[in-house]
Image (cartoon, grey):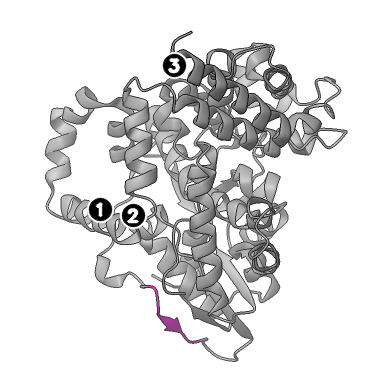
Amino acid sequence: MSLSAEKKQQNSKNDVETLYQLSYEATNRCVQCGYCLPVCPTYKTMGKETASPRGRINLVKLASEGKIDIVDHLSQPIDLCLGCRACEVACPVGVPYGLILDSAKQVIAKAQKVDKKPSMKKSVKNIILKHLFPHPNRLRGIGNLIWIYQKSGVYKAVRKTKILNKLSEPLAQLEKVLPILESPSKRYHPGSIIPAKGDRKGTIAFFLGCISDAVLHRTNRLSIELLSLAGLDVIIPDKQKCCGALHTHQGMDEQAKALAKDNIAAFEQSEAEFYVNNAGGCGAMLSEYDKLLKDEELWVERAKQFVRKSKDISEILVQYGPLPFIKSWNGIITYQDSCHLRNVQGVYKEPRKLLQSIPGATYIEMEGSDQCCASGGIYNILHFNESMKILDKKMDKVKNTKATTIITANPGCLLQLRAGVERHGASQEIDTLHLIDILAEACGIE
């Protein structure tokens, strides 16, 4: 046997041992009952067992036992999972699918390092996750360039020539559904403190996020001003970073842990009563820092304290409400759950309560609002066609509500739903907003 072949075989053995240690016990809890099948978006569109939660769990079990190859047989089914974790909510025996999924992704990522063959997907992930998201200033710089691009009117020529479509259909779609950015001069920066308006009720620390801070900073600004209007001093901790969710989704746990430690240290310095975010996906990651750092003796207690203080903004606005609405909203509104806000954080009543309290608005519950829209972090970029199949089914449900406005509570979902509206030629009839955008408008905040 050659030295390289022997090394590869040893690496494979080590990978199986790692997978066994991480999640084999959890896979044995699955009784293969099938309760997860009706709620799994990829199973419904792909129609095969390897695209279902129980199928993926069985594959992880087989890989743990060394019966199938991690890269050849496990990597694609795991990569095609959206990680929405609706299966965890549906499971009657409490299988920790998120643990199994993340463990498998770690081992797959490690095994794929042996494969040195270049690919576009690898290059995209490497650039985005290693050289962009961990660096807030770089992301803000990109956001500023996008603002200039929109302000100058260059985007009109880009769309007319369809040059981006020739380069990348997912990229072209993303460009088309980006909201018109407000001036970067209005962006709140780390280190700022925004005092409460009226009677002071408490102090919170606000998590800016990465995509939100770069291209949805208007929603961040409105969030901060709503919290201030609710009677809260708002601290924006300096040196905060990306939450690390995208890194764990791609099996890059070491990078995620480094980001988590930076965030814990940054928010501890605020001494705030709560740590508040406005992004379901980020919030889910923040709420699981204790699991991410469970084996780090110096960080585990600090992580648990961080998790106890982490809250979605809808929870805080309900807790310190009611909001002082001064404007009515005309039309039918419907709500699409953020999977990670609902399935991981267990927050679904509060956004609906806030929407139903808006004067003049007619709220209609959408059938399947708890089912994934297929944004999935960067899933809709890496698996565009699979994502669009799920999104098209979602848009059929939206149309049935007759809604003129779709509301969601996660940046990725927001852009994905905008894409759905655009794909179905309904951009003149249906608007898509973040929960904060509609609440701020009803409160007279512009």
Residue 142 got which mark?
1
Query: CA–CA distance between discs 2 and 1?
Result: 8 Å
Query: CA–CA distance between discs 3 and 1?
Result: 45 Å
- Chief secondary structure of the magenta portion: loop
Residue 221 shown in magenta: no
Q: Residues within 10 Å of mark 1 (few under 14, many from 20)?
A: some
Query: Residue 218 location in percent, x, y?
Result: 37, 63
Q: Secondary structure at mark 3?
A: helix
- Where residue 120 sits, quadrant-wise, is top left
Residue ID at (49%, 79%): 235
Q: Secondary structure at mark 1?
A: helix
Residue assigned mark 2: 215
The tag earlier along the polypeptide, 3 or 1, is 3
Residue assigned mark 3: 3
Residue ID at (70%, 67%): 301
- Foreground mark, 3 or 2? 3
Residue type at tag 1: Ile
Query: Residue 185 location in percent, x, y?
Result: 25, 71
Magenta residue span: 190-195
Regarding residue 357, the answer to whether it shows in the image is: no
The foreground one among 239 and 110 is 110
